[in-house]
Image (spheres, helix red, strand yellow):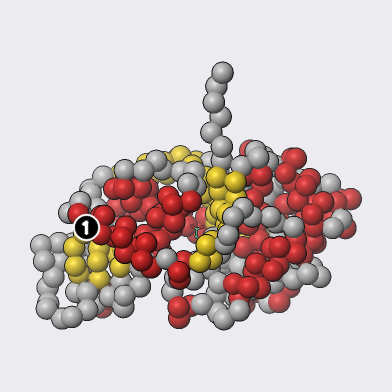
Amino acid sequence: MTERMEITGRFAPSPTGPLHFGSLVAALGSYLAVRSKGGTWFVRIEDLDPPRVVAGSADTILRVLDGLGFEWDGEVVWQSQRYGYYSEMLDELKRSGHLFRCTCSRREVLASAPHIGEEGPVYPGTCRRGPQKDTGQSAVRIRVPDLNVCFRDGVQGEQQQNLEQEVGDFILHRADGQFAYQLAVVVDDIAAGVNQVVRGADLLLSTPRQIFLYRCFGKQVPAYYHLPLVLGRNQEKLSKRDGPAITVNKDNGSGLLWCALDFLGQAPPVELQNMPAPEILTWGRQNFSFSKVSAVNNTVTFC
Ligand code: GLU
Ligand code: ZN
């Protein structure tokens, strides 16, 4: 008998505004990928960075998801309540000797970078042997190797990135005291037992950093599926600029859910279009397949 591993996935929105069509696609993709296989699906609010959090938006997101019939397992996890845990996990990495304090300002990093990578200026390892100044404020970075991190994304195919040459030693704890997204997302997914990460392709270039952190913690790397991005009018990732039509609410929710299924290439029947959201989700659970999801970012007609 072959033992099938149960799938655990999650949707991890940042509460920087109400749920919009682009995040609905990520919510739906992660939900269906798990529920079509009878697995576990969590919701985590990534309210790590207080200045970016818009008051009330997390509750709006949760209310809209709930109203559409997305049922999540367990309690919602709030990153803002987990600083103690991030700090413990950071200490664990510290003991491995991979971390160092960095006193470089943003401007200094920009000036010293050998080049600007796709993810910003590449940090050239300036403070690896010790911080350059003795100012009180310092960030904590992790030293990365000059090696390619390779993985196969379930939607985007084979990927590779040389962390040292394309990103540089990256920040885990910022000089302003905030924990970095890269650390929080990995330790939260480890804690929740997440073994399948389905999210927007804007995070594809973060994935090698995250895989590297899994290895540092000695943990199993999840399977990754990066969904195509929804593009707005200017052919850029959908955002508030694209107007109120993309904001999901209780009136347009089921229509947008159908559009999200369609965007994911699932070819939902037209008759489903006017059905209540829970029925659209049921059809999705019965019919979802990653093989139908395109890797190519695309616009949607209603925008
Ligand atoms: N919070 C991130 C976002 O909303 C998603 C993080 C993730 O799925 O890993 O873009
Ligand atoms: Zn530095």
The residue depicted at 20 percent of the width and 51 percent of the height is 96
Q: Toward the viewer: 248 or 295?
A: 248
Q: Amino acid at mark 1?
A: Lys
* Residue lying at the far top of the rendered structure: 1
The residue depicted at 18 percent of the width and 80 percent of the height is 136
Indicate whether 178 appears above or below 221.
below
Q: Is residue 298 visible?
A: no
Q: Is residue 211 left or right of residue 69?
A: left
Q: Is residue 285 left or right of residue 273?
A: left
Q: Is residue 74 left or right of residue 202?
A: right
Quarter holding the N terminus is top right
Q: Would you name the residue on which mark 1 appears? A: 94
Indicate whether 297 appears above or below 250.
above
Q: Toward the viewer: 109 or 36?
A: 36
Position in image of residue 126 (x %, y %): 16, 66
How packed mark 1 is, by other alpha carbons closer than 10 Å (few <14, some 14-19, many 20 or more), is some
The residue depicted at 27 percent of the width and 75 percent of the height is 175
Tag 1's secondary structure? helix
Position in image of residue 55 (x %, y %): 57, 81
Q: Is residue 34 visible?
A: yes
Quarter holding the C terminus is bottom right
The residue depicted at 54 percent of the width and 66 percent of the height is 45
Question: Residue 109's image quarter?
Answer: bottom left
Question: Residue 93's image quarter?
Answer: bottom left
Indicate whether 172 appears above or below 225.
below
Question: Residue 291's image quarter?
Answer: top right
Q: How many marks?
A: 1
Question: Does label 1 point to a residue whose CB lies under 8 Å from ligand 2?
Answer: no
Q: Toward the viewer: 34 or 126?
A: 34
